[in-house]
Amino acid sequence: MVKKHCLFCDEIVPIESAGDYDKYMSCACSPDGFYSLLSESYEPINSLSYQEKRHIFPVVSAYIRERTDCDDLVALSIDDMSTIANSPKIPVTIEEKGNRLLQYLYRHSDAAEEPVVIQPLSRSYNLTYSPNLQELVFIIDKLATEQFMIREGMTFRLTTKGWSEAALSAGGRKLKPCCVLISDEEAMGGEWLDKVLPKIEQYGYVPQLLNLRNIDSVKLSSLELVSASKLVIADLTGQEPEVYFAAGYALGRDIPVIWTVRSCDADKLKVQTGDIRPLVWENAEELTAMLQQRLSN
C-alpha cells in the first residue's frame, strides 16, 4: 500500500486515491478513520511558511480528529486552511479546550465513571486543539483538580460533574429522547425531577416527564412525544389506564419500555402478564439505583 506524509500530524500513513482526493488513513488526525485531501493541494500546503504551518497545522489536525470522531466525512483543500484556522468555532482559551476533552470522553462513554483509554497520549494533544503535549497535560491536570474527571494512567473517567458539563453541549452526540410516564406528579414529581431524571440523563437520554393523571384520554401531542422517544419509562403507581395505554403504544412501535411501580401498589396491578415485570421501588434512591443497573446493561 502507498504511504505518504500527513502534513498536519507529521506521520507517515497509508493513503488511497479516490478521484481527485487522497484518503489519509489511521493517522493521529483520525486514528480510527480517515480524511481526504485534494491531491493538487498537497504541495501548495506543504509550501506554506514555517510560521503559517506552526499556526495552522495543529488546528487543522484537531479539526479533522473532532469531525471524524463525530462520524463526519472531512475533505480538505488549500482553500480550507485559513478558514479552519480562523473559524470562531475553534477553541482558543484553556477552558474551551478543556471542554473539548470532556466532550470527547462523553462521546466515548455511556455513563459517568465509565473508563475511556486514550493511547498514545503523546499523539493526542489534538483532542484539545493544543499545539503540544505540555498544554494537554496542563488541561488534564486542571480538569482533574476541578473534579470534572479522573485520570489513572492512560485511562480517563468523567465524574458526574464532568458528565453533566459535557452533556450541556452533547459533545457532538445527540441525546436520545425519553418519555417518563407517571400518574401522580404531586406525590412523586419532585423526587423524580431531582433524583431520577438526572440519572436517566447520564445514560444519554433527554427525559421528559409526562403526568397522565386525570386525563380523559391520552392527547395526540403526548403520543407524538412517545412516538419520538427512544425509551419509555412507565410508572404504574396509581394504576392510571392512560399510563398503560401510552406505554402499550410505545411497545407497538418497538420502543423499549421499562416498567416501574412503587412497592405499595405492586400487588394491585390491573394487568398481570409476563410482559410487565416492573421494577418495584420504595424510594427515589432505590429506583435510581435500579434504573442505573438496567440502563447500563
Image (cartoon, rainbow, N blue to C red):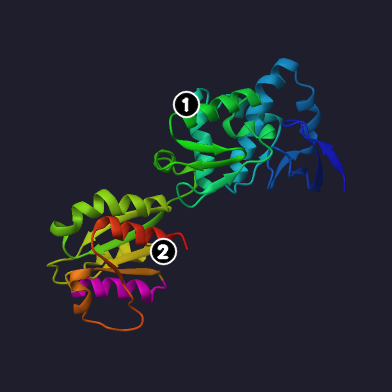
> Residue 201: x and y, percent?
37, 51
Secondary structure under badge 2?
helix
Q: Which residue is mark 1?
A: 95
Magenta-tinted stretch:
241-254
User: Residue sitting at 13 percent across and 57 percent down?
Assistant: 186
Q: Position of residue 197 (x, y in %)?
A: 31, 53
Instruction: Give the residue drawn at x 47%, y 63%.
Output: 297
Please state if 178 lies on the left or on the right of 50 as rendered. left
Where is residue 16 shown, x and y percent of the image? 81, 47
Residue 121: give x, y in percent of width and height. 66, 35
Q: Counting residues from the N terminus, which is met first, the one under dot 1 or under dot 2?
A: 1
* Left or right: 114, with 118 as reference point: left
Q: Which mark is residue 294?
A: 2
Position above or below: 23 against 123: below
Could you tell me if residue 288 is visible in this image? yes
Residue that extends furthest to the bottom in the rendered view of this protein? 273
What's the residue type where badge 1 is placed? Answer: Glu
* Displayed quadrant of residue 153: top right
Query: Is 246 in the magenta?
Result: yes
The label shown at residue 259 is none
